[in-house]
Every structure is written in structure tokens, then in C-alpha cells.
Image: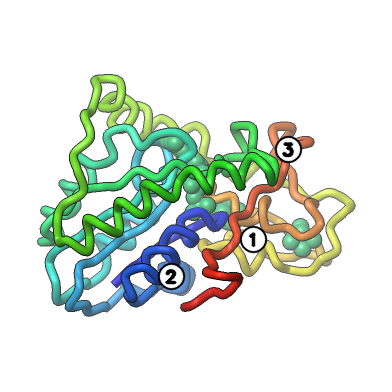
Amino acid sequence: MIVYFSGTGNSRYCAQMLAVQLGDELIDAFHFIRKGIAADLYSERPWIFVAPTYGWQLPHIFMDFLRGGSFLGCKAAYFVMTCGNEIGNAGTKIGQLCAEKGFDYQGVLEVVMPENYIAMFPTPDEAESARIIAAAQPALEAGVKWIRQGKPFPYERISLIDRLKTSVVNPLFYLFCVKAKPFYATNACVGCGKCEKACLLSNIRLEDGKPVWGNHCTHCMACICGCPSAAIEYGRHSHGKPRYRCRDYKVNGVLEI
Ligand SMILES: Cc1cc2nc3c(=O)[nH]c(=O)nc-3n(C[C@H](O)[C@H](O)[C@H](O)COP(=O)(O)O)c2cc1C
Ligand code: SF4
Ligand code: SF4
């Protein structure tokens, strides 16, 4: 069973690709997290967990979802992390989580996809995004091959810098950077309510037809990148940058799941 979390669609795209290629079931963690329900799932096939990289680790919200859930049946668990650049030493943290949950850890696959972190970094335009997604296909296809063969993903060498990013910088990143305060809606807002529905933490509510952000944010970028009017800004950081959303994975123009 493939279980994914995605803010702007990259991880959903990869999860859909794996589901189509492996003929496996696909579950979106969004509904569980949004409703505050613990997952209670059963799979006879290996678990494949797909999520973005946040500060060189799995998103804390996704790790909490995994910790709090029940995943019965097969013990083998593969992890696929999409990223804009690299996942650091995320594998060690995932290995610890698997030990806690009784999973038989089968490794983590790094898949470089378009950067979505508009609150901090430049985001790619459509042509650049398409090029990056095309370049990600061999990694995904290799992942499909290893899973089909029942082999763990190959181990990637971890440097001291990787270890520091994941263990030391990640907590500081959450403490100092992951904040909703700089979000605001411009006059381009048409009050459609899409941002309110897109927030997995229900951190946005419409007041007088305009979104207002609370303090419970995990920086998934779903609100700012999903606004159909590009009416959301993050302080000055997002000014003039393309709003990035990944398309669905389709075969001959058809989404087969
Ligand atoms: C809060 C946040 C933190 C991020 N941290 C990293 C990181 O440490 N390394 C990296 O390569 N990309 C990082 N990124 C980029 C995303 O991991 C990447 O674009 C991912 O594919 C987005 O997946 P999604 O579209 O499924 O949400 C970060 C993005 C966000 C929003
Ligand atoms: S998604 Fe955009 S246009 Fe719709 S309510 Fe939110 S900010 Fe306004
Ligand atoms: S407020 Fe926006 S960035 Fe924060 S969790 Fe909700 S949708 Fe994601």
C-alpha cells in the first residue's frame, strides 16, 4: 500500500506513478491529518511511504501521522522522499521510526523534484519544472524495480554535513522559520475559499471573504501555491515568484487510479 503526504503535488505525482507501475493501492494522509484521525490500515504488500523533505527530514507532521497510526500486515516499509535538492541524513531518523513501529526498514529513495519552498527559495517556471520532473523518472523507475524485486533501496553515503543538517539544523529550522505570520492575501483574492480547504492543519479561515492564518502551520505551501488568483504572499519572499504545483501522473493523458 502506498501512503503519501504532499503539499504542492510532487510527492502525490511520485506516489501515483508508483501506484500505477506497481498496481498498488494509494492512500492520501491528508484526510487523516485534517480530521485528526489515526490511520488504521492493513496491507499484505510492502508499505511505501511517500513525502516531501522538510529541513532534511520527513515532515514532522508526517512522522507524527506514522507514529500515531496502525499499519498492520506486511512489515516491510520503503520510503520515497521528494526534495528540491537533497534529503541529508533523513534515512537515519526514518530507521529509528521504523524500529519504534516494528517496520522492517527497506531504505529511502531520494527523488529530486521542482523546489516548492516559495517562502524561502526561488521556484522554477513551467519549462524548468517539466525538465526537472522528466529528469526524476530514472530514479522513480529504479525504485519500482527494487520494490518489485523485494530488495531494499541502495544505501547512499552520508557525510558529516548531512548529519548536522538533519540533527542540528532541522530543529532550529522548525523553531525559527516555520511560521504562518508572514502570510497575507492581496486585493487579488476573490474569496473562493480554496486555501481554507487546502490546509491540512485547518489553519486558515475566511473572515469577511478573506483568509486569515492562525499559528498552526507546517509550511507545506499548499495555500500560497494553490491559490487560483496568486493572491497569497509570504512577506516579501514570494513576490514575483512562480506559484509551483505539480500535475498528476498520467499515462497517455489518463490518470489510471
Ligand atoms: C518547509 C519546507 C522545507 C523544505 N526543505 C527541503 C530540504 O531540506 N531539502 C530539499 O532538498 N528540499 C526541501 N524542500 C523542497 C521540497 O522538499 C520539495 O520541493 C518537495 O518535492 C515538495 O513536495 P510536495 O510538492 O509533495 O509538497 C522544502 C520545502 C518546504 C516547503
Ligand atoms: S485561494 Fe486565493 S482567491 Fe481563494 S480565498 Fe484563498 S487567497 Fe482568496
Ligand atoms: S497555512 Fe498554508 S503553509 Fe501552513 S499548513 Fe496550512 S496550507 Fe500549509
**Pointer 1 residue Cβ closer than 8 Å to ligand 3:** yes
Q: Are marks 1 and 2 in contact (CB under 8 Å)?
A: no
Q: Are marks 3 and 1 in contact (CB under 8 Å)?
A: no
Q: Marks 3/1: CA distance?
A: 22 Å
Could one spot residue 174 in this view of the protein?
no
Instruction: Identify the secondary structure beneath mark 3.
Output: loop
Q: Who is closer to the viewer here, 82 or 59? A: 82
Q: Marks 3/2: CA distance?
A: 28 Å
Q: Amino acid at mark 1?
A: Ile
| Left or right position of 128 against 86 | right
Q: Which residue is mark 1?
A: 204
Q: Who is closer to the viewer here, 110 or 256? A: 256
- Figure check: 257 above or below 98: below
Report the image quarter containing ligand 2.
Answer: bottom right
Q: Amino acid at mark 3?
A: Lys
Q: Amino acid at mark 2?
A: Asp
Please state, as top left, top right, bottom left or bottom right, where the N terminus lies in the image: bottom left
Circle 1 Cα neighbour tier, 10 Å, few/some/many (<14 / 14–19 / ≥20): many
x and y percentages locating residue 126 in the rendered image: 69, 46
- Figure check: 74 above or below 63: below
Q: Residue at x 30, y 47 (%)?
A: 109
Could one spot residue 63 in this view of the protein?
yes
Identify the residue at the far top of this view. Answer: 160
Instruction: Identify the secondary structure beneath mark 2.
Output: strand
| Left or right position of 147 against 199 | left
Q: Who is closer to the viewer here, 102 or 206? A: 102
Q: Residue at x 36, y 47 (%)?
A: 139
Instruction: Say whether disc 1 or disc 2 marks the residue closer to the N-terminus.
Output: 2
Instruction: Say whether disc 3 or disc 2 marks the residue closer to the N-terminus.
Output: 2
Q: Which residue is mark 2?
A: 28
Question: Where residue 56 is drawn, which disc sits there?
Answer: none
Q: Which residue is mark 3?
A: 241
